[in-house]
Image: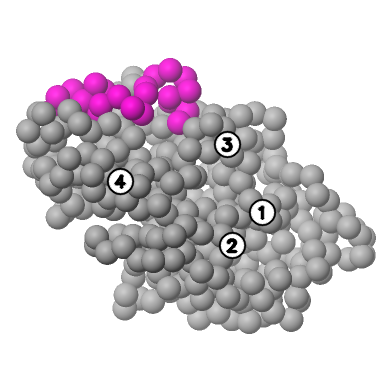
């Protein structure tokens, strides 16, 4: 296990006021500015209980950024700063970003029907039902396509409800990758690499799994994307993802599940739904987390938490916190983890 990184932005004592300006690491990162928990007024005695909980819950890596600077960076169980790990469904938000980029370049419009880009017959629905499905429906999990199978092949893409009338967490979102590839007239990963990955200095790759494409990267690359998200699509002086589109993506996208944007999960709403069911739960998605938090959430508790009110990004990668009950996205782990984080930062 490597030690937690707790270091000052500059060599000085902890009484120095930490920088309030937003920091972005260079794309050829050799160093990443840091700041100490004590200089932020955090509770140092609560750090070890947080680390103990992370270890107990099968965490491989954990980071906290404030104003882009590293406050905590921890690796466990042989995982290192250069190790790659899968984002699982947290990577859906990468697809959101690249869809927004393709739209701002005039290659597509999310309000257009998917068949405009993929041709008619991309589903096994009746054509008049298929024609109701837009890219926005894929971004918001409201395509109405049957969710009985997560394997996205044409024979499984059958009609269940009219697009826009039913929210259901489903891997059919990945057809957005095909939309982007068709609209850009190039391989999806090539477009992604040139328009997003290289722009913010990420490493990583897309793995074509049996169920859906999964992004793999090191922890700092996940943190880079979280920092881009904190700044609503802006990296340093470049607006990589249109701010209007990004703001849309982190706000309620439909009236069925208010806690869902464009593949982003949203905290602080009046109710929420979770993958695998149609039950509506009252209250906030993660009650212990700040109400303004938006999050990328993936199976086995891969997480990017973005908290604009605190200029904070929190990253967690690892195995499932509860191996006997691995979640697709939202889990009780989030609320328990935020109890531990709050003890440190409040």
Return the residue nearer the eye: 155 or 26: 155
Q: Residues within 10 Å of mark 2 (few under 14, many from 20)?
A: some
Circle 3 — which element? loop
Residue depicted at 34% across the width and 70% down the height: 326
The numbered mark, 4 or 2, whose residue comes first in the sequence reads 4
Residue 112's quadrant in the figure?
Answer: top left
Quarter of the image for the N terminus: give it: bottom right
Name the residue beneath numbered marker 4. Answer: 141
Residue depicted at 61% across the width and 29% down the height: 239
First to last magenta residue range: 100-121
- Does 290 sit above or below residue 242? below
The numbered mark, 4 or 1, whose residue comes first in the sequence reads 4
Label of residue 233 in the image: 3
Name the residue beneath numbered marker 1. Answer: 309
> Cβ–Cβ below 8 Å for labels 1 and 2?
yes
Circle 4 — which element? loop
Image label count: 4
Mark nearer the viewer, 3 or 1: 1
């Amino acid at each position: 296990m490597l030690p937690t990184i707790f270091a000052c932005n500059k060599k000085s004592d902890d009484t120095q006021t930490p920088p309030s300006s937003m920091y972005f690491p260079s794309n050829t990162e050799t160093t990443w500015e840091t700041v100490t928990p004590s200089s932020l007024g955090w509770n140092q005695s609560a750090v070890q209980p947080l680390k103990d909980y992370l270890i107990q819950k099968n965490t491989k890596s954990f980071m906290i950024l404030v104003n882009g600077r590293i406050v905590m960076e921890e690796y466990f169980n042989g995982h290192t700063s250069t190790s790659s790990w899968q984002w699982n469904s947290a990577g859906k938000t990468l697809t959101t970003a690249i869809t927004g980029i393709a739209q701002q370049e005039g290659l597509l419009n999310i309000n257009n029907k998917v068949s405009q880009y993929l041709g008619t017959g991309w589903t096994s629905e009746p054509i008049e039902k298929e024609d109701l499905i837009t890219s926005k429906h894929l971004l918001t999990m409201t395509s109405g396509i049957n969710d009985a199978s997560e394997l996205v092949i044409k024979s499984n893409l059958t009609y269940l409800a009219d697009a826009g009338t039913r929210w259901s967490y489903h891997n059919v979102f990945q057809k957005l990758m095909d939309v982007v590839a068709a609209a850009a007239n190039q391989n999806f990963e090539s477009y992604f690499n040139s328009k997003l990955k290289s722009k913010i200095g990420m490493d990583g790759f897309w793995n074509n799994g049996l169920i859906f494409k999964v992004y793999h990267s090191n922890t700092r690359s996940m943190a880079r994307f979280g920092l881009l998200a904190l700044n609503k699509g802006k990296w340093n002086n470049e607006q990589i993802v249109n701010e209007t589109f990004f703001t849309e993506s982190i706000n309620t996208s439909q009236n069925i599940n208010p806690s869902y944007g464009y593949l982003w999960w949203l905290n602080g709403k009046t109710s929420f739904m979770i993958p695998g069911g149609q039950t509506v739960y009252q209250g906030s998605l993660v009650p212990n987390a700040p109400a303004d938090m938006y999050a990328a959430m993936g199976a086995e508790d891969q997480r990017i938490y973005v908290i604009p009110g605190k200029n904070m990004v929190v990253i967690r990668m690892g195995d499932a916190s509860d191996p006997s009950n691995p979640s697709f996205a939202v889990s009780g782990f989030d609320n328990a983890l935020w109890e531990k984080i709050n003890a440190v930062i409040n």
